[in-house]
Amino acid sequence: MHAPTICYNIAVAKNGIKKVGIITKHNIKIGENAAYFKNLISALKSYDVDLLFDEVCGELAGKEKTYTKSQLLRRCDLVIILGGDGTLLKTAREIGLARPLIAGVNMGHLGFLTAFTTQKFLTSLPKIFKKQFCEDERFLLRVTIYRNNKKYFTTLALNEAVINQGGFARLINMRVEINQRELANYRADGLIVSTPTGSTGHALSAYGPIIHPKIDGFLLVPLCPMKLGVRPIIIPNDRQIIIKLETEWRAEKKPIVLTIDGQVTVNLKRGDTIRVRKSRRTFRMIRVGNHNYYKMLREKLNWGA
């Protein structure tokens, strides 16, 4: 069963939004972005809330005390993210068990995940503080590398985890198991493990299917597999994916890498095991008004244009 879309957060409905955090992209201080930021702060102050700022925008707000992303996510009832999908993805990896409400305001380009335009967010503030919004909860991946039978690296991913050769095209050998049952021995340029949220990203460009965000599944997409019959597969997200790297170690300048959400990379070695499972942590985004997922696909992907 998928998590339903609900029209308010229970804790917020009881206690109201008391603390609001703001996370921004690095160039918020430039031009129109800075002007919008100041207008937003002015509007938020009228709702008698405590405003907390990240390190980037704290200076612009004239605040000496600032907070890291993880601190804001722990302390706030609502966190506003000013940026593009990249800023939102970076923030998602810092999410803890507190699970505040997230409002993504698009200051980037495509904006698949950021639900609000800059002007729409300003006009939506009265409804947000009256708790007239819908909650769109997305699950995350927990991705862990084991090396020599010891945990070497672990992180979260909202979109996907990708194993590939980087800029050097050469086949990689990977043995993939689902709950310790063999799925396939892949010989391919790489492999993507994606959430439904990430299915409109890298996985889509590799000819993977789009998965509706309310479907509880993982998507595995091989990159340029050697065998024509090897195709993407969707599996339930209550399974654990185990990927064993069987390719010989290559030169440092041409490493096989694990890339998380297109932002974090870790070099891999022969014998490494990558385990991917559904995290207990979720990312709770809010939307105001009627959200039409299919209309969003048409507009963002230029379907029927």
Image: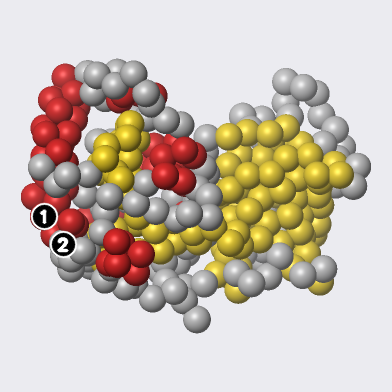
Residue at mark 1 = 126
Question: Left or right: where does residue 104 sit relative to residue 284?
Answer: left
Q: CA distance from mark 1 to mark 2?
A: 6 Å
- Identity of the residue drawn at 66% across and 30% down: 168
Q: How is the image coloured?
A: secondary structure
Q: Quadrant of residue 32?
A: top left
**Along the horizontal axis of the image, is 152 left or right of 305?**
right
Nearest the eye: 276 or 91: 91
Dot 2: few (<14), some (14–19), or many (≥20) neighbours within 10 Å?
A: few
Q: How many marks?
A: 2
Does residue 111 show up?
A: no
Amino acid at the residue labelled 1: Pro
Amino acid beneath label 2: Lys
For the C terminus, the quadrant is bottom left
Q: Which residue is mark 2?
A: 130
Q: Residue, x 34% and y 51% (percent of image)?
A: 77
- Mark 2: secondary structure: loop
Q: SS for tag 1?
A: helix
> Which residue is pictured at 61% across the width and 29% down the height?
167
Disc 1 packing (10 Å; few <14; some 14–19; many ≥20): some
Return the x and y of residue 298 as percentages of the image width and height: 24, 60
Q: Is residue 248 above or below residue 57?
A: below
Tell which of 247 and 239 is nearer to you.
Answer: 239
* Above-or-below relation of 238 to 206: below
Q: Kindly identify the residue that appears in the image at 15 percent across and 28 percent down.
A: 38
Where's residue 131, x and y in %? Answer: 21, 63
Query: Looking at the image, do the residues carrying marks 1 and 2 touch, with CB atoms under 8 Å apart?
Result: yes
